Amino acid sequence: MSASRLWRSRSVVHNEEELWEEYVDHPDPDIFENIIVAKDGGFSEIDHLQSLSSVTHRNFPCMAAPMEEGSIFWSNLSVTVGTNVLVEPHSGLARAGRCLAVMGPSGAGKSLLLHSLAGLAPANARVSGTVCDGSGNCRRWGSEMAPKAAMPKAPAGPARSTPPPEAPEETGDDYDMPVIVKVRPDDQLDLSPEELEKEVPPRVLYPLNPRAPHNTTQFSFKEKCFKTDEQVDQVVMHFSMDGGILLKDSPEAQDQDEVLDKKQQEQTEKDSQEAIDEDFDPPENEKEIPKKNPLRNQFNFSERAAQTKNHLLRDRSWTTQPPPTTRNYGTVTQWEIFDQYMADIEAAKEKEKEEKTKSKISYDDLTDAKKKKGDTDPTYSENMKLSIKIMERMVNQNAENEVYHDFKFWEDRSDEFRDGEGTLLPLWRFSSEKAKKKQVTCIKWNPRYNDLCAVGFGSYDFMRQGTGVICCYSLKNTRFPEYVFNTDAGVCCLDWHPAHPAVLAVGLYDGTVLVYDVRAKTKKPIYQSTVRTNKHTDPVWEVRWNDDESAGAMNFYSISSDGRVSNWFLLKNKLESEEVMELKLISAAAGEDETTLAGLAGGLCFDFRGGKENHLFLVGTEEGRIHKCSKAFSGQYLETYEGHTMAVYTVRWNPFHDKIFISGSADWTVKLWNHESRQAILSFDLAQAIGDVAWAPYSSTTFAAITSEGAGGSTSGVVHLYDLHVDRNNRICEQKVVKRAKLTHVAFSSSEPIIIVGDDRGGVNTLKLSPNLRAGVVRTEDTDPNLTDWDLQIQKMEHLMEMVTETRPA
């Protein structure tokens, strides 16, 4: 730090005389551009003044330079209370239109300084010094009033509208009190002290009409009832008159003049056409001059009359013989009248019943009628329907020939130059008119017919629930669904029967479970749960058919948000349920080793283990926990896995390795688990909420996950593919599938190299996997030929588990 700067930071200026002396004697006067005003005890104020070095002729104590109107200058201003000095004597200038900063810690005296400059210091405070404004008006405490000549004035302004202030009163011994100047207007009334103390009641005018009705009732045609109109019209029209006066130069007056001129011109032309030319000799004298008739006919009317003969009236009449009549008479009793009325009522009922039966023709009768008609007319035969369906598929495949060629034969050759990475090729987008403005809530491929998949449509927004739709799409006809079923509530889940590919189990948002037979000609379910059969009270999020045939009857399982896992049996004429387990909520008390069970947890997903131990199943809950349960023992959970912090949307066993399962949650993570360990093996953070997770059927280490949003928070669905055998840390494919839509579900085809993803706009997108994304078992020379592909897949997963276990910290 230079010597001048050090001197400026340590100097404390108390008045303008000391400042002027130091400014004249100091070798570097530029440091006086900012003056620090301070006092012992922590007060610190910074006042930005104009540079003193640029005005060599200035007399600082008097501030001889002219000030603009609105500026404030103070000299030797100090404030004391008793023996305490709150503001030490200092001077300053605040110019109009400049920014002034008064800074300091709390309690330094910033507010007291500003109140003193405005003349609003407390009554117990003693103020001394002088304060002047840009107009030359000064106020001085502790000495006589400063003359106006001591302060240079700004240019003269307009004349004052108020009278000059009265002479200041004598202060006497209170020389330190501020001088109060009272200005009295010329039009002020002379009121007595009693009148001044009298309180004048306020008079307020409100824009409200006191006579306006406040209970006007009008009939609402929308709601079919009378409703009170709360809007009151406060406007009252006291006088209104429609004027007929127009300005001569206005466009309306010019149009009116044109119309009048046109009418006058038409009348002149009409009179000229009706005029009669008379050729007569002029009169010889005044007597022959015709006199003007004052009662001339103004309407050219001539009265003419004539008499005609009246026609004679003639009457004609004839007589005929009366028609022959017969008399019928008899006697009746009350019982006969009653019997007749009852007979008429019975006849009316029979007639109404016949009309109802005619309107409601049974399906069998209709089928028989169609068969009878089909026997004679081949247009309505079953063979014709089959031929039309085949023809429709051929037309569709011819129209989309290039897409079908890409699906069957095209391969992405660029995968040969990539190190394990791949791409997705968009093929088709299935859509239906009935599924518009609905969300895809579930997707399931048929276990036998590999080209057929069932898609359920509903809504995940509980405020916008409506009806649901089930569409069965086929790769042979990508334009229209093969089967369509409508439901009363939104569809949440569905599943094909593994042995009977035409039987479809469906779970709805209102807690109902349905069973359809797609081969049936009716669109109604063959089984439906009701309140009597103990249906769920909350949405059914997943259903799964039971592979074990030891139960005898066909049955399937369902899980719901009401905390119950139920088993449904398809009997001969009804659907019965059996409660498998109640998902009790686990809460661990602080400081206790054991856990307490309280309440029911909402179930969102479940999956049954394949293989020999098929009695085990996993349940994902809304609390983020995953429970391992058993069909044979429903008393408590076998194991609880805690790794997610939000709801678990999907949990799936590995199709090859019976110890590994995967889970996807709303906490943006996908976790890989070993059911023998309570901690996750691997965790993948996708930075977005996970919509669904699915294992690939061709590899034990490949899975796909979807997120609802893309990079940067954009609303676009993204598909993520991982192959843990290639790279266990990073994804091998990340591709945006749809724009301005969120993906909801994903499913791999069991036989074709494609996946299908559904979005929240009712669309189902088909994508083809490149060769690097569908790499299965790779056999080399060192591979044991006795091992099957299944064994090799298990070895891949075991090798991955060994590597992960070695790299995990002990």
Image (spheres, rainbow, N blue to C red):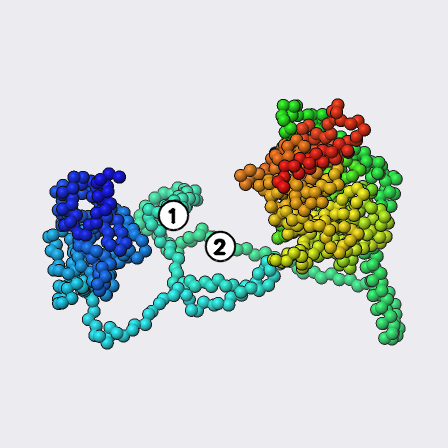
Residue type (three-letter) at the residue carrying disc 1? Glu
Determine crowd level at label 1: few under 14, some 14-19, many 20+ residues with C-alpha closer than 10 A.
Answer: few
Q: Is residue 660 left or right of residue 333?
A: left
Q: Is residue 460 left or right of residue 102?
A: right
Q: Which mark is residue 54?
A: none
Mark 1 vs mark 2, CA separation in Å: 44 Å
Q: Secondary structure at mark 2?
A: loop
Q: Quadrant of the C terminus?
A: top right
Foreground pick, 487 / 334 = 487
Q: Secondary structure at mark 1?
A: helix
| Labelled pair 1, 2 in contact (Cβ < 8 Å) | no
Q: Quadrant of the N terminus?
A: top left
Foreground pick, 624 / 181 = 624
Using the rendered image of the protein, determine whether residue 765 is visible from the camera's viewpoint: no
Q: Which mark is residue 303?
A: 2
Determine crowd level at label 2: few under 14, some 14-19, many 20+ residues with C-alpha closer than 10 A.
Answer: few
Q: Position of residue 246 (x, y in %)?
A: 35, 51
Using the rendered image of the protein, determine whether residue 146 is visible from the camera's viewpoint: yes
Q: Is residue 576 left or right of residue 103?
A: right
Q: Which residue is drawn at the image coordinates 64% and 56% (left, top)?
A: 588
Q: Which residue is drawn at the image coordinates 30% and 57% (left, top)?
A: 107
Q: Position of residue 266 (x, y in %)?
A: 42, 44
Q: Position of residue 745 (x, y in %)?
A: 67, 41
Q: Which residue is drawn at the image coordinates 55% and 55% (left, top)?
A: 306
Question: Which of pointers 1 and 2 indicates the residue nearer the eye?
Answer: 1
**Earlier-in-chain disc, 1 versus 2:** 1
Residue at numbered disc 1 = 252
- Classify 801 as above or below 141: above
